[in-house]
Image (cartoon, rainbow, N blue to C red):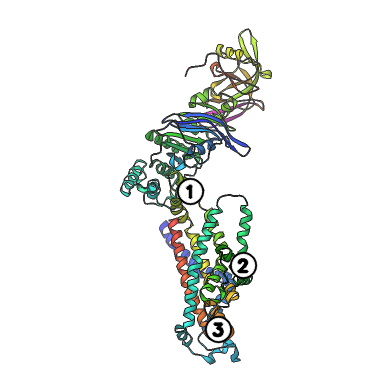
Amino acid sequence: MTTIHLNNLVKRFGTFTALKEMELEVRDGEFMALLGPSGCGKSTTMNMIAGMENPSQGRILFDGKDMNGVAMGRRGVGFVFQNYAIFTHMSVYDNLAYGLKVRGVAAAETHRRVLAMADFLQLTPFLKQPSAKLSVNILQRLAIGRSAIVEPAIFLLDEPLSNVDAAFRAVMRTELKHLQRQFRQTMVYVTHDQLEAMTMADRIAVMDHGVLQQVGTPLQVYDDPINLFVADFIGAPGMNRLKGTLAQADRGLLIDLGPLGVSAPLLADVAEGARRAGVTEVIYGFRPERVSLADQGGIPMQVTIVERIGARTIVHLGRGEVAVKAVLDNNVGLSAGVVVHVVVEPDAVRLFDAASGVAIRPATPKVR
Amino acid sequence: MSAVATEKKLPIAASETSDTAPEARRLGLLLTLPAQVLVLFIALFPLLMQLYISMTDWSPLDGVGWWQAWQSWNSFANYTDLAVDGRFWSALGRTALIMAICVPVEFLLGLGLAILFIDDFVGKRLFYSIMLIPMMVVPAVAGYMFFMLFQSGGPINNILSTLTGTPITLAWLSSPTTALIAVMVADIWQWTPLMFLILLAGLVGVPEDQMRAATLLGASWAQRFRTIVLPKMKTIIIIALAIRVIENFKIFDTLYIMTGGGPGVATETISVYIYKVTQQDLIWGYVAAIALAILLVLSILVAFAIGRMNAARKERVA
């Protein structure tokens, strides 16, 4: 049970800066996901927390204690590797007992704790088995158990589900979340899969190119992405975006979408926010689920593809620069070529500065 | 109805398979015949020839071909002679002594070097190439090199004189103990690189993430080495040791050039002994008997090593 504080953390490899001035607090018992595409610095951050790499600058604090110079075996960090790094030449029992044995815990105590951990993780039937031939979900439990048995204050998980096939991933996600609830440990989870982050994390830290973009609960980063990168990266499909110019009309402030016509008037606080930001060139963004298709009154666009994914139907509209997606019920009777009007729910509209990609905040931020 | 049909069909199917099985076996034999003939000529034929000659007193000076060696048939006399041949037993013991010292030293040096070469450092590639030079030197050349190094006025004595501050003019190769040390130094110099190469390959194969996992669980370097590295390298260590034990047992060229087995018989190993009996005494029937005995000893060693290796592999796979 530990708070992790990353203070102005920087990591450079030669001239390449992998991580730029990271500032992050992971609260006690929190499940924090570090989310980003490969090369965003999330694994580097994780390795530094574990002590596998030293920061070029900045500090890592566990409960206020500087971890700089503390060897990786002495930080009280449990680490679950991408491929679990199970000791394949040992039995399940020996894997579980490893951490206790190397710490010189008495044999009887070790035995007791291994049995308790095996019982807790439902590994008892496998104890005597060699670990080389276990299935992935047992390996995952074993990897977690092996780390947990030495009672680390912090758990770090490095993309533990990336080697698992899609169908099984959902099962593993649930199991992992369940385990975290039981252990009540501070967990940092590195992933490039936004779905994993959304479903499991208490909070998500979205990273890109070594820069921390946004930290927030899954719904915060989903609903109010701080910039276009986060808007794109979170959600599948990502947020729709159309280029536009702020325009004043009788009905209020709206967005001139060029050939697509104009948008519906912005909500008062969004308009006020846009006015205060003082930008004119904007990106008009909205989530694909927050639209409806109508015969008139919205943005007229041509249907290009109707994609049926089972539970929902994704309708692709427009082409190239001016393309949006709408996630709709399966009963939309559409086919390619038809022109429909895209009606965006007024409170779903998110504006971004076209030049910087930064979100334009409403005048009175929503309280969530 | 259907039951009857299957019953009728079954014998036909069975006869078909029993017809094709010997045919397939014959084809298999035909296809592997060239390889089998090759093995026969390379391994089996000389072995049988050796066994045959070992039961005679045949010598190339007899004036008859080896196939007529039966003329001097003595059944097991060579073997009974061998059992009481003091020079043979002392040569065997000496060979075992050299092996018992050289192989562990080469192993430990090779392992130590391999561990150093796991991490990156400046000039690693250069040192790596330099490390392999001894292995590439022709053993006869290496023998002559060490012959000169160990002369009483040679570089080794010079270095020792400088280090100790007292003039040393030890005639290394002329005294039984120091001559033995000298030939062992030469062997270690030449064959440590092979150990290094094999063990480095093994070390590189130890999964890094498992090592890290062990570190994160609090294992010290020594603990990681004992619990992760050694078990993972078990097979390769056995291979490396087996190769060196077999090779070292046959130690000859370097040693022969350095000391010729001398002074006296102080450095006479089994190979040197066989060579002398072959070239000087020319009793080839006796030589064949010695060689066969050695083969037996080595086979037992190898069988032991292979057994251990399989056990290690099974342990890891199971």
CA–CA distance in space, label 1 to label 3: 54 Å
Label 1 vs label 2, nearer the camera: 2
User: Do pointers 2 and 3 mark residues of a single chain?
Assistant: yes
Question: Given the image, on which type of amino acid does mark 3 rest?
Answer: Val
For marks 1 and 3, the one nearer the N-term is 1
* Residue under disc 1 on the same chain as residue under disc 2: yes
Mark earlier in primary sequence (2, 3):
2
**Residue at (55, 60) in percent of width and height:** B196
Q: Which residues are magenta?
A: A305-318
Of mark 1 and mark 2, the one earlier in the sequence is: 2
Which quarter of the picture shows residue A235?
top right
Q: Provide the major secondary structure of the magenta segment.
A: strand
Q: Residue at x 35, y 44 (%)?
A: A118
Identify the subunit bearing mark 3: B
Closest to the observer, A58 or A237 = A58
Query: As shown in the figure, which amino acid type bears the numbered disc 1?
Result: Met
Badge 2 element? helix
Q: Is residue A274 left or right of residue A160?
A: right
Position of the N terminus of chain A, as image quadrant, is: top left
Badge 3: residue crowd in 10 Å (few <14, some 14–19, many ≥20): some
Mark 1 element type: helix
Q: What's the residue type where badge 2 is placed?
A: Pro
Examine the rendering and report whether any part of residue A264 can be seen: no
Tell me, yes or no, whether the highlighted magenta stretch contains residue A313: yes
Which residue appears farthest toward the front when viewing the image?
A: B166
Q: Of residues B6 and A73, which is closer to you in this image?
A: A73
What is the x, y in percent for residue B67? 57, 87
Q: Label 3: state its secondary structure.
A: helix
Using the rendered image of the protein, determine whether residue A155 is visible from the camera's viewpoint.
Answer: yes
- Report how far apart the C-alphas of labels 2 and 3 lie in the structure: 34 Å
In the rendered structure, find residue B211 and report the number of the disc placed on it: 1
